[in-house]
Image (cartoon, rainbow, N blue to C red):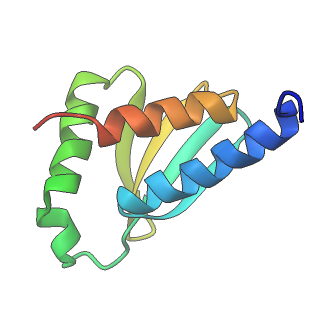
Amino acid sequence: FGPIPPATLSLIDTMRIRWIANQLGAEKLVLKSGKMILYFISKQDSPFYQSDVFTKILEFLKHHSHEAKMYEKDNTLRMSFNSVTSVQQALGYLTRMVNTRI
């Protein structure tokens, strides 16, 4: 059938991003204007914030504070990455977060 077209590969990577973001507890992910923002579970007393997954996110942030920052806005915890210019770069950040050791 030949090589997979680049647009199809981007679509597949977009689905991977959604799956990984969901695994990381993100209710929403925005990739726009060179920035990626994850919006975490809005319920502040959620067990998610005591989970190993959230611990991984904090560990990732500890070692990559020059690339990402976490902040609260409108009662929602968010994590933003600057200079994310491609779907593949976004996928790379999320994959590294999932694979962070605690």
What residue occupies the far top of the structure in this picture? 66
User: How many numbered discs?
Assistant: 0
Measured as percent of width and height from the top left, residue 3 is found at 84, 27
Q: Which of 35 and 25 is in front in this view?
A: 25
Q: In which quarter of the image is residue 32?
A: top right
Instruction: State the quadrant of the N terminus.
Output: top right
Instruction: State the quadrant of the C terminus.
Output: top left
Measured as percent of width and height from the top left, residue 93 is found at 45, 32
Q: Nearer the viewer, residue 18 or 12?
A: 12
Measured as percent of width and height from the top left, residue 18 is found at 56, 57
Q: In screen coordinates, is 14 left or right of 27?
A: right
Q: Nearer the viewer, residue 78 or 97?
A: 97
Q: Quadrant of residue 62?
A: top left
Q: In screen coordinates, is 70 left or right of 91?
A: left
Residue in the image at 74% along x and 37% along y:
33
Residue in the image at 63% along x and 54% along y:
15
Q: In screen coordinates, is 2 left or right of 9?
A: right
Residue in the image at 62% along x and 37% along y:
35
Q: In which quarter of the image is residue 101?
A: top left
**Up/down of 15 relative to 13, above or below:** below
Residue in the image at 48% along x and 41% along y:
80
